[in-house]
Amino acid sequence: MHKSEKFWDKIANSYEKKAIKNENAYNETLENTRKHLNRDDIVLEFGCGTGTMALEFADSVKEIYATDISSKMIEIANKKAEIRKIKNVKFSQSTIFNEKLKKESFNVVLAFNVLHLLENTQKVMQRVNELLKPGGLFISGTVCLTEKNKLWSIPVFILGKLRLIPYVQCFKISELENFITNENFKIVETGIFFPQPPRRFIVAEKI
């Protein structure tokens, strides 16, 4: 088992119980994502956690395939879907590199609060491009820890070395956007709804 999987399995229950700190920002993220979704869309969300956002978007699309590295997170997500009787969201413990995910099979790929936790952003974005249909959308929200305060990288580095947290990439907004546009995407919308630290909302179209 990968150390990141162990970490997220361990905190899955507390993660699910944690209250949303900024409901206005959360609702803005939902609203600005939903306006880019269509009823006939096939959607992939990777790093879905306990499935909160995938379930929010279920009534806006045809199907959502939602994956996470943590089996405990997926277990909670499946229970939530069962309670709410949502049938068009399929949860699985997996990563975006699962070979069962076919090329150009998704209209939209979602990634909320996950890009900064992945070690090879370029490789991930290449895979996102591969999975999207021509003209498909990549919609993400990513914490940019060093955008306004470079000192964030110090405690992140120390905690990572002590293995108290998983890998964390300390992005600046420009760095994050370059990773996306360098893999044949055109950014069509941006925003910052969670200000401290800034979480960059990006909608990018495959070109």
Image (spheres, rainbow, N blue to C red):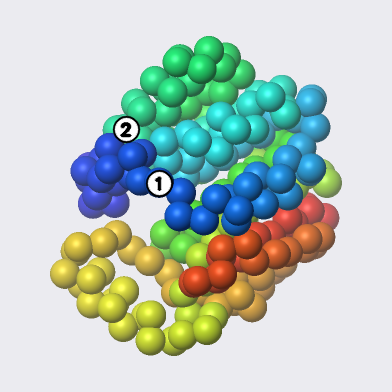
Q: Quadrant of residue 170?
A: bottom left
Give the residue displayed 66% in from the left and 73% down from the top: 178
Q: Nearer the viewer, residue 33 or 63?
A: 33
Vertical relation: 175 (above or below) 39: below
Location of the N terminus (image quadrant)? top left
Q: Nearer the viewer, residue 31 or 180?
A: 31
Location of the C terminus (image quadrant)? bottom right
The residue beneath circle 1 is 19
Kind of residue at disc 1 = Ala
Vertical relation: 172 (above or below) 206: below
Q: Quadrant of residue 202?
A: bottom right
Instruction: Say what secondary structure mark 2 lies in.
Output: helix
Give the residue displayed 16% in from the left and 69% down from the top: 162
Left or right for 149, reference 13: right
Give the residue displayed 28% in from the left and 78% down from the top: 155
State the image coordinates of residue 3 (x, y, percent, origin top left): 23, 51
Q: Nearer the viewer, residue 159 or 186?
A: 159
State the image coordinates of residue 164 (x, y, percent, origin top left): 20, 63
State the image coordinates of residue 193 (x, y, percent, origin top left): 63, 62
Residue 71, numbered circle:
2
